[in-house]
Amino acid sequence: MTKSKLLSLVALAGALSAFSTFGSAKTCSVEISGNDQMQFDKKEIAIAADCTEVELTLKHTGKLPVTAMGHNWVLTTTADFQPVATAGASAGAGNQYVPKDDARVIAFTKLVGGGESTSIKFPTSKLKAGGDYTFFCSFPGHWSLMKGKLTFG
């Protein structure tokens, strides 16, 4: 084999390797909305097993300001949901009503008020296929109504 052909094959192998790595990463987008009646528009979110990252957008479709009717989106295991929601009230608005540096929190958005939206990205490596996950709004008094189930896999 000539040196030129060998270099071409090495370059092709490198390009294919880079392409296969690029092709295996998949960001899955999810949108969820909250309103002034303390309701999410979804009770369940399903994330496919081939997603490597989730991009979640939270939209507040109401009119009330963040101080009166703020919403966020918090993800924990179902076992951790209630303790984290309770701890969130003590964390305060400055911490988005999410306990600071709490390992039980898988992902969360900032608080938004009427007409606002926010987005986050988080890796699915934080999730287990078939795991039991709950998403909720941790604004005080909201989590008992604004919650749902997230499935992965």
Image (spheres, grey):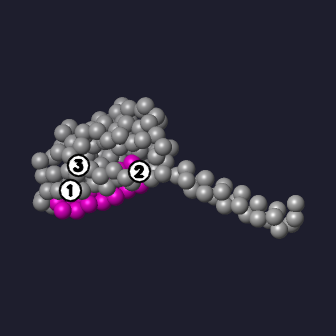
**Looking at the image, which is closer to me, 7 or 96?**
7
Which residue is denoted by mark 2 in the rendering? 28
Callout 2 secondary element: strand
Alpha-carbon distance for marks 2 and 1? 21 Å
Callout 3 secondary element: loop
Q: How crowded is mark 3: few (under 14 residues within 10 Å), some or many (20 or more)?
A: many
Which residue is denoted by mark 1 in the rendering? 60
From the top left corner, tell me how far across and down residue 32 is, in percent.
26, 50
Asked if labels 3 and 1 touch by Cβ distance under 8 angstroms, the answer is no
Instruction: Name the side, left or right, on which 58 lies relative to 2.
Output: left
Identify the image quadrant of residue 3.
bottom right
The amino acid marked with disc number 3 is: Phe
Numbered range of the magenta stretch: 107-122
Asked if labels 1 and 2 touch by Cβ distance under 8 angstroms, the answer is no
- The quarter in which the N terminus is drawn is bottom right
Instruction: Name the side, left or right, on which 81 lies relative to 122.
Output: left
Q: Earlier in the sequence, mark 1 or mark 3?
A: 1
Identify the image quadrant of residue 103.
top left
Task: Answer whether residue 91 is visible to the viewer in this image.
Answer: no
**Looking at the image, which is closer to me, 97 or 73?**
73
| Above-or-below relation of 52 to 114 | above
The amino acid marked with disc number 2 is: Cys
Which residue is denoted by mark 3 in the rendering? 139
Q: How crowded is mark 1: few (under 14 residues within 10 Å), some or many (20 or more)?
A: many
Q: Per the image, is 108 magenta?
A: yes
The amino acid marked with disc number 1 is: His
